[in-house]
Image (cartoon, helix red, strand yellow):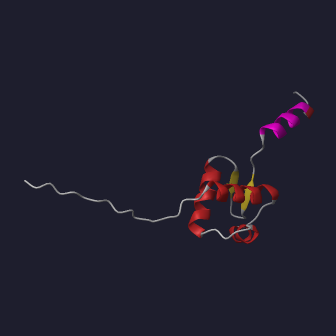
Amino acid sequence: MPQTIHIKEREKLTHSPTLNTILMVEDVLKNGDLMTLAELKNKLPKKVMHQTLLQILDYLQFSGKIIIGTKGILWIFTEKKELNELIKRGTEV
């Protein structure tokens, strides 16, 4: 009995973001305020494919670095050094 080999095709061929692209998007979001997706695209120093940008935003949201709301995208992640400084200056309750 001959065996049939099935080759799975990728349903969606999407471009995976590079580390440099992720860091570029992070820098723009860190240095900016609340911005829409269109504003983010305009502020990026290099053009990024739409699907790639959406993948990056999904990753950043999943990792707790940004919030995506109805009004736009906002950077919320606080670096460990900044957090420690805020704790030192704060008052313990």
Residue 30, placed above or below residue 64 = below
Nearer to the camera, 60 or 16: 16
Q: Residue furthest left?
A: 1
Residue 47, placed above or below residue 23 = below
The answer to if 22 sits in the magenta stretch is no
Residue 31, given in percent of the width and then of the height, sits at: 81, 57
Principal secondary structure, stretch drawn in magenta:
helix
Q: Residue furthest top?
A: 93
Q: Residue at x 72, y 64 (%)?
A: 71
Residue 25, placed above or below residue 85 = below
Q: Quadrant of residue 73?
A: bottom right
Residue 68, given in percent of the width and then of the height, sits at: 67, 58
Using residue 32 as the reference point, say whether residue 13 is left or right of it.
Answer: left
Q: Quadrant of residue 54?
A: bottom right
Nearer to the camera, 45 or 81: 45
Q: Residue at x 10, y 55 (%)?
A: 2
Q: Residue at x 88, y 27 (%)?
A: 92
* Start-end of magenta stretch: 80-88
Using residue 81 as the reference point, say whether residue 72 is left or right of it.
Answer: left
Residue 46, given in percent of the width and then of the height, sits at: 70, 69
Using residue 86 as the reference point, say whether residue 22 is left or right of it.
Answer: left
Q: Residue at x 65, y 52 (%)?
A: 60
Number of labels in the image equals 0
Nearer to the camera, 31 or 71: 31
Q: Quadrant of residue 55?
A: bottom right
Q: Quadrant of the C terminus?
A: top right
